[in-house]
Image (cartoon, grey):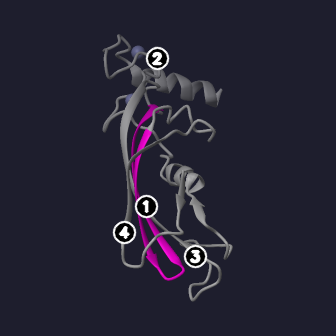
């Protein structure tokens, strides 16, 4: 997604609404197979261009606890500053310096980064997911199994370890 910055005016927000993007080539496409809807607001301050990104998509995750597939609505807001040529701001995590002859800014990488930075370390289908029975593998969110003596089962495991 590219934004032409040549005609941007000082103190005048440039807004792009409802731009559709995909994460097909990111290596994370299995988790984000659906289109994301993006809204971008660009504010120009001299050589600095502040990009405000609002991103919405539906993620397809697998619960770490019960191994069921589930969908999760993802809404992210992110700010990033691009600086054209060297200005007062030094390059840092929040400011990215681009060559002085830049005429358009490609934010595709930024959009991928926003998704990756917010990608969950642990995926949980719901608060308090009961997970799978360690005895028989039944999904305890949906069913009750007949392993009534799970504590004994765990003891068995321990005994085996000690042997
Ligand atoms: Zn679960
Ligand atoms: Zn069981």
x and y percent of residue 143 in the render? 31, 14
> Gap in Å between the C-alphas at discs 4 and 3?
16 Å
14 shown above or below 21: below
Q: Nearer the viewer, mark 4 or mark 1?
A: 4
Q: Residue at x 47, y 22 (%)?
A: 134
Whether residue 80 sits left or right of residue 14 in the image: it is right
Q: Which residue is mark 4?
A: 13
Circle nearer the N terminus (4, 3):
4
Dot 2 falls on a residue whose secondary structure is loop
| Mark 4 close to ligand 1, CB under 8 Å | no
| Mark 2 close to ligand 2, CB under 8 Å | yes
Circle nearer the N terminus (4, 1):
4
Circle nearer the N terminus (2, 4):
4
Q: Quadrant of the C terminus?
A: top right
| Mark 3 close to ligand 1, CB under 8 Å | no
Specify whether residue 52 is painted magenta. yes
Dot 4 falls on a residue whose secondary structure is loop
Q: Which residue is mark 2?
A: 137
Residue furthest front in the image: 7
């Amino acid at each position: 997604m590219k934004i032409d910055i040549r005609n941007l005016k000082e103190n005048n927000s440039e807004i792009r609404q409802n731009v559709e993007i995909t994460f097909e080539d990111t290596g994370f496409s299995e988790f984000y197979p659906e289109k994301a809807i993006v809204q971008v607001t660009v504010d120009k301050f001299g050589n600095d261009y502040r990009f405000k990104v609002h991103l919405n998509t539906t993620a397809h995750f697998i619960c770490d606890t019960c191994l069921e597939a589930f969908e999760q609505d993802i809404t992210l807001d992110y700010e990033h500053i691009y600086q054209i040529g060297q200005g007062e701001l030094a390059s840092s995590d929040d400011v990215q310096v681009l060559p002085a002859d830049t005429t358009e800014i490609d934010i595709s990488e930024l959009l991928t980064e926003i998704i990756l930075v917010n990608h969950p370390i642990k995926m949980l289908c719901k608060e308090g997911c009961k997970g799978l029975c360690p005895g028989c593998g039944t999904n305890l969110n949906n069913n009750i199994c007949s392993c009534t003596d799970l504590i004994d089962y765990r003891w068995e495991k321990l005994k085996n370890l000690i042997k």
